[in-house]
Image (tube, rainbow, N blue to C red):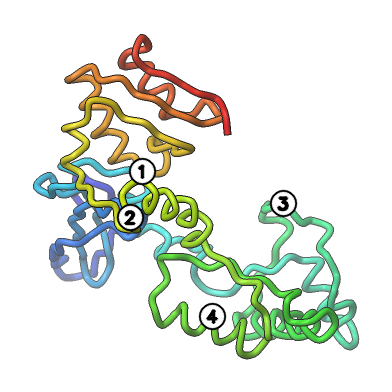
């Protein structure tokens, strides 16, 4: 249509005018919580755009948020499952061949190495392989990497399956991997695991420091607000990171004289 924003999946119905509705929502990706305006035509999302009146992002949004609807309408996410060809060939041998077979194309995601398989058959193969490894090497040979963005119900089911059925405690998530050090720091410096801060505090800072945080990539709205404040007030910034990240280069582009990069772990 004539939508100036992202057209993720234009949906038109022949012989009738497309009815477009608008919903005010929050971006589903990182914890910044950008205000997002979603437009829907005939049951499909056709536009994701930032809300200029939202106090968090003020009309800014990163590419992840702007394209958040696309995965729902990409062919690779629909229909039959993708299984590596040589793994599927091994599975179809008598007695399913070697259940511990490792694909010769591991690491490559070229289309030529895959075959489309009905979901029921693909999940049956995965279930057999999980059961094989659990019986052969014990439950802890099966690991699961979860997400802090799962629903409570989803987290309950994955824990029930891993711990209650497989007997595995090899389960981890970014929720703990990233927050263990952060919460320890919060308690030590602020006395609470909930930092008593607000986004408005960024514009009150006399100096901003990032420790192992590439904000320009992981939390771009925070970076843009900090960069805008640096440009307006010429505040010093410090980035402690062994890598020369986009955050480092972004601050240096504004003023290299008061942008410090400390390349240590």
Residue 96 position by quadrant = bottom right
**Residue 23, above or below 236:** below
Q: Earlier in the sequence, mark 3 or mark 4?
A: 3
Query: Left or right: where does residue 166 sit relative to residue 53?
Result: right
Identify which residue, 135 or 198, lies in the foreground: 198
Q: Quadrant of residue 114 in the image?
A: bottom right
Is 94 displayed left or right of 72 in the figure? Answer: right
Q: Position of residue 1 (x, y in %)?
A: 21, 52
Residue 166 position in % (x across, y down): 68, 86
Judging by the rendered image, the residue that carries numbered circle 1 is 219
Q: What x and y, as percent, mark residue 42?
A: 22, 71
Q: Secondary structure at mark 2?
A: loop
Pointer 2: residues within 10 angstroms few (<14), some, or many (20+)? Answer: few
Q: Dot 4 lies on which element?
A: helix
Upstream in sequence: badge 2 or badge 3: 2
Badge 1 density bin: few <14, some 14–19, many ≥20, Cα 10 Å: some
Residue assigned mark 4: 158
Say above or below: 55 vs 25.
above
Q: Which residue sits at x=22%, y=48%?
A: 197
Front-most of residues 38 and 5:
38
Checking the image for residue 108, the label placed there is: 3
The answer to which of marks 1 and 4 sits earlier in the sequence is 4
Mark 2 to mark 3 CA distance (whole Å):
31 Å
Q: Residue furthest left?
A: 53
């Amino acid at each position: 249509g004539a939508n100036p924003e992202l057209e993720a999946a234009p949906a038109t119905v022949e012989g009738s005018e497309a009815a477009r509705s608008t919903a005010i929502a929050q971006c589903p990706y990182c914890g910044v919580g950008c205000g997002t305006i979603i437009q829907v035509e005939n049951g499909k999302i056709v536009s994701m755009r930032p809300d200029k009146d939202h106090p968090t992002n003020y009309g800014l949004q990163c590419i992840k948020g702007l394209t958040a609807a696309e995965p729902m309408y990409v062919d690779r996410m629909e229909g039959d499952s993708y299984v590596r060809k040589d793994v599927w060939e091994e599975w179809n041998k008598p007695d399913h061949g070697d259940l511990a077979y490792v694909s010769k194309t591991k690491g490559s995601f070229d289309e030529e190495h895959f075959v489309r398989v009905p979901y029921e058959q693909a999940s049956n193969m995965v279930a057999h392989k999980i059961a094989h490894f659990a019986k052969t090497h014990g439950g802890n040979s099966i690991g699961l990497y979860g997400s802090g963005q799962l629903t409570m119900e989803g987290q309950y089911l994955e824990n029930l399956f891993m711990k209650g059925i497989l007997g595995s405690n090899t389960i981890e998530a970014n929720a703990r991997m990233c927050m263990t050090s952060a919460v320890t720091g919060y308690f030590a410096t602020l006395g609470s695991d909930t930092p008593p801060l607000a986004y408005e505090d960024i514009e009150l800072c006399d100096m901003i420091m990032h420790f192992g945080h590439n904000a320009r990539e992981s939390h771009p709205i925070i970076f843009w607000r900090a960069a805008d404040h640096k440009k307006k007030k010429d505040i010093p910034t410090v980035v402690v990171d062994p890598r020369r990240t986009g955050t480092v280069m972004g601050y240096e582009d504004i003023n290299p004289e008061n942008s410090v990069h400390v390349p240590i772990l």
